[in-house]
Image: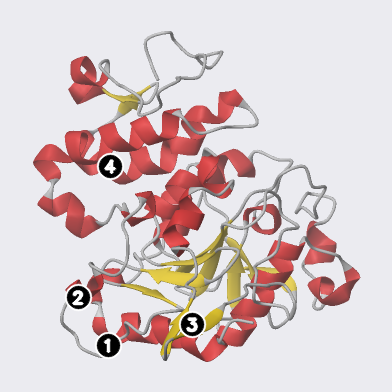
Amino acid sequence: QINMDLVSRWLSLCNECHDGCKPNAQDTSPSFRFRVVDVLKGCVVDAPPDCEYVALSYVWGNVNQLQLTSNTLHALSQNGALHGRFQTANTIQDTIELCRGMGIQYLWVDSLCTLQDLDEKNCSIMHMNTVYGCATLTIIAASGSNANAGLPGVRHGTRNSIQHFESVDGLNLASTLQFPTWCAELSHWNSRGWTLQESILSKRLLVFTDHQVYFRCQRARWREDIALESWSTEAHSSNDGLIERSSLDHTISKTQMNSYHGVAFQAFYMPLSAQFIRRQLTNDRDAIFAFEGILKALSPAIGRSRWGLPEKHFAMALLWQTDDSFPRPRRQAFPTWCW
């Protein structure tokens, strides 16, 4: 099982040493009904002002899971509803348990915090930059291919990594685990369209792979099998040689927008849209919605967009490209000239 104290220490270190990793101020827009799961009371509640919460990024897959609808809203708002009365998917159960272990009372998860059968869902989609940008921590479920895969290591017996030891002429050797970022990079989670903006917009990630957990913020990358933590307030640049880079290292923050304002189109929009094009969606019509949070976060620098292409860079944006060697057929219901 994971060491809950170690995971909590990572978050504490970041809170105390990294000013640039603090969550954005929460959106007070009256049009956005922001609900969270209270993991102590076991029910869905309206988010208290400026509350500390965890967001979950996962894959639904072909699983019939519990959802918040106009019919279940009242029942799921009752104390204890999620403590046995209703059965949630394994990944959500494990995340609730993880939040309790870390001492964080509130959790945002799309299936339980947004009404799935009303216009509120469309409104929430337009605020994904707020949901993930304001989260204290985003949990990435990069193991398995559906919502029942769980978070390996939260429950006993859900991780089975075996380390081999051998002594050769007095030299003790041990096998190492796979790089966790490689595991996340090759995961089913990383192939889905919605999950790109969920990781890009988050200030801090706690990524669960089959074999271990790792933490990524704006200044550091820590993992279970290497002791890299330091209480120094200096940048953790010493990590760079030990932690391999991946697409999960891309983030969008206000600091970056200020630094790259003039080149945000080339530095952020073009590479992120190229990444997104090769990702899969259950419904191709969701393509713009699944990228909307990124467009909204970039809007101070690149302006408004039409069909996903920034208007002020429209001519250049028409030269969009994909990093996939075998591009997928174009998505229906969109103009032929947009990605």
Nearer-N-terminus badge (4/1):
1
Nearer-N-terminus badge (2/1):
1
Residue at the spot x=60%, y=64% of the render? Answer: 210
Q: Which mark is residue 298?
A: 4
What whole-number distance in Å separates the C-alpha atoms at marks 3 and 2? 20 Å
Label 3 with label 4: CB-CB less than 8 Å: no
Taking depth in this image into account, of 145 and 100 the one nearest to the observer is 145
The kind of residue tagged 4 is Leu
Image quarter where the C terminus lies is top left
The kind of residue tagged 3 is Val
Residue at the spot x=76%, y=57% of the render? Answer: 148
What whole-number distance in Å separates the C-alpha atoms at marks 1 and 3? 14 Å
What whole-number distance in Å separates the C-alpha atoms at marks 4 and 1? 32 Å
State the residue position of label 3: 7
Nearer-N-terminus badge (3/4):
3
Residue at the spot x=62%, y=72% of the render? Answer: 161
Q: Which mark is residue 230?
A: 1
Dot 4 alpha-carbon crowd within 10 angstroms: few under 14, some 14 to 19, many 20 or more: many
Residue 229, percent from left and from top: 32, 85
